[in-house]
């Protein structure tokens, strides 16, 4: 990650999936599920299956549709498997970190898909290396795989997972294929999403419920923080083990604000509803009179419709209009390596419709401001086509600190809001007025207390013990020197 001083290995915001089916090969449902999770990662895609005798793996760089040909899917035999899409970090195209990570140990074969980021990878790697484990990547997923493999030599599956959970510290939603058994594990604070669904002929674990929808399945529920879910062979059912209990969760609010699909349900909330509610609250907190409300496509849409609806409910004479058009063929501007390239790409990506804007006051709604590139460019573009005034309203609080838990933000130095007040940011962006949403409004829209959210990027206080950063709760770092610390053997 850009602010890599405290990060162990690359930051990964990814999508994971796992299925167990009654007889039918798992490859195709996994492939379709990965398609539904493509927004969570575009760098690489992979599937690992097991046919009862051996493991099959196909992992490629690129988009899901390009990574698998017919022949690849045919070769992925077996009714159980896991899949992964991986998000790139700035500038890196890193085939060694593509997943699922698969490996055969004395204890059997393992395929691991991980979304999240551990914060004690370096210590664990050192300790495992000292006891003879050799690593092929610098990622944290391989560390989890080695730790679990070692524990599987000495304990049954459930205890082995528990021992690994007691040693790893950070955020993780995992789908794991241990031979033909599929597991789902969510970190004790539930930072990244993971849910369980029922298919006609089996069960599925996925980062987001949209992946269950595309297979015509039914969402059963979220995997609970600290829970291990074991899918039965032949897709007959699943077992649940609450392996770790913690008082508070640390759900990532940014999943709801930006990262997840609006049609997914996460921790009981439909993301679309949350975004509309955040938009409504934005109007309540900082509504401003203007002729027209414009969403920044696509991420600002649900916020803007909630904002405009609340304004109209209050009697405001304001139009909601799609006055900014997005070119879908421009890649991700956010991770482009230089500021100049990012600015050029925003210009290519977003074009205002002059007729909607000219001679009118506009309120532009986006989900978030990170470096400020998009908002600065947009204000300029809208002024250029004759807007009378451009107000900006943002559906999240100021992002003032980096994310260590699996979302690629930017380094602290790059964040436009780090160490600055809203008026300074407004001046930089060039808007007539600028308002962000309060943290309390985010907590209220999610129906969670602040203590149950990870707010690290908006407060600079993290729910994990990150070297050099402050934490917002009591945390004991796991004692990794003793691999079996705190585990009862009966
Ligand atoms: P910026 O232009 O750097 O201020 O980034 C803000 C824009 O990027 C907004 O339109 C967001 O929808 C989008 N965005 C926010 N966070 C991320 C992220 N982690 N990765 C990619 N895009 C993001």
Image (cartoon, helix red, strand yellow):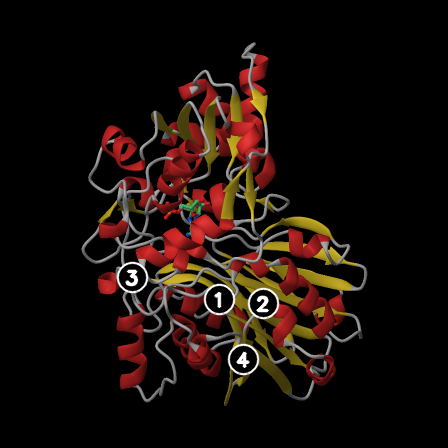
Q: Which one is closest to the eye, mark 2 or mark 1?
A: 1
In three-dimensional space, the C-alpha distance between marks 4 and 2, rounded to whole angstroms, equals 11 Å
Question: At numbered mark 4, what does the secondary structure look like: helix, strand or loop?
Answer: strand
Provide the residue designation for mark 1. 114
The circle on residue 51 is none
Q: Position of residue 4 (x, y in %)?
A: 26, 63
Give 441 or 354, whichever is nearer the viewer: 354
In three-dimensional space, the C-alpha distance between marks 2 and 1, rounded to whole angstroms, equals 12 Å
For this orientation, the residue located farthest to the top is 315
Mark 1 residue's CB less than 8 Å from ligand 1: no
In the picture, which quadrant includes the N terminus? Answer: bottom left
| Label 2 neighbour load within 10 Å: few <14, some 14-19, many 20+ | many
Provide the residue designation for mark 3. 2
Marks 2 and 1 in Cβ contact (< 8 Å): no
Provide the residue designation for mark 4. 110
Residue sitting at 41 percent across and 27 percent down? Answer: 390
Mark 2 residue's CB less than 8 Å from ligand 1: no
Marks 2 and 3 in Cβ contact (< 8 Å): no
Provide the residue designation for mark 2. 183
């Amino acid at each position: 990650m850009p602010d890599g001083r405290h990060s162990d290995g690359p930051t990964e915001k990814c999508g994971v999936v796992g299925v167990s089916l009654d007889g039918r090969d798992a490859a195709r449902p996994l492939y379709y599920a990965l398609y539904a999770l493509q927004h969570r990662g575009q760098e690489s895609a992979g599937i690992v299956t097991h046919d009862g005798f051996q493991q099959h793996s196909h992992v490629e760089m690129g988009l899901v549709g390009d990574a698998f040909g017919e022949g690849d899917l045919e070769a992925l035999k077996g009714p159980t498997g896991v899949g992964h899409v991986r998000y790139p970090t700035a500038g890196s195209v890193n085939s060694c970190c593509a997943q699922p990570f698969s490996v055969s140990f004395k204890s059997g074969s393992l395929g691991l898909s991980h979304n999240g980021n551990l914060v004690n990878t370096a210590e664990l790697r050192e300790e495992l290396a000292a006891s003879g484990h050799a690593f092929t990547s610098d990622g944290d997923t391989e560390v989890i795989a080695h730790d679990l493999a070692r524990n599987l030599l000495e304990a049954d599956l459930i205890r082995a997972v528990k021992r690994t959970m007691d040693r790893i510290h950070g955020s993780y939603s995992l789908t794991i294929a241990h031979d033909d058994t599929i597991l789902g594990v969510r970190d004790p604070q539930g930072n990244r999403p993971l849910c369980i669904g029922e298919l006609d002929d089996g069960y599925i674990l996925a980062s987001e419920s949209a992946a269950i929808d595309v297979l015509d399945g039914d969402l059963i529920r979220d995997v609970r923080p600290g829970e291990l879910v074991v899918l039965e062979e032949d897709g007959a059912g699943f077992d649940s083990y609450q392996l770790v209990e913690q008082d508070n969760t640390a759900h990532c609010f940014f999943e709801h604000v930006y990262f997840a699909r609006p049609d997914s349900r996460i921790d009981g909330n439909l993301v679309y509803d949350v975004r509309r509610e955040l938009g409504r609250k934005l109007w309540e907190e900082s509504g401003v009179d203007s002729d027209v409300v414009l969403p920044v496509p696509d991420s600002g849409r649900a916020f803007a419709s909630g904002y405009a609806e609340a304004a109209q409910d209050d009697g405001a004479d304001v139009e909601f209009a799609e006055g900014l058009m997005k070119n879908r063929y421009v890649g991700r501007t956010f991770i482009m390596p230089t500021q100049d390239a990012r600015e050029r790409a925003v210009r290519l990506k977003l074009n205002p419709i002059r007729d909607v804007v000219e001679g009118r006051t506009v309120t532009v709604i986006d989900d978030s401001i990170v470096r400020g590139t998009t908002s600065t460019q947009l204000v300029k573009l809208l002024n250029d086509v004759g807007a009378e005034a451009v107000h900006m309203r943002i559906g999240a609080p100021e992002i003032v600190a980096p994310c260590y838990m699996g979302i690629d933000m930017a380094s602290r130095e790059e964040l436009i809001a780090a160490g600055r007040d809203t008026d300074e940011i407004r001046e930089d962006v060039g808007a007539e007025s600028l308002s962000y949403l309060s943290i309390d409004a985010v907590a209220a829209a999610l129906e969670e207390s602040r203590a149950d959210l990870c707010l690290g990027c908006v407060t600079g206080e993290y729910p994990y013990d990150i070297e050099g950063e402050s934490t917002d709760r009591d945390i004991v770092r796991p004692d990794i020197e003793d691999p079996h610390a705190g585990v009862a053997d009966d």
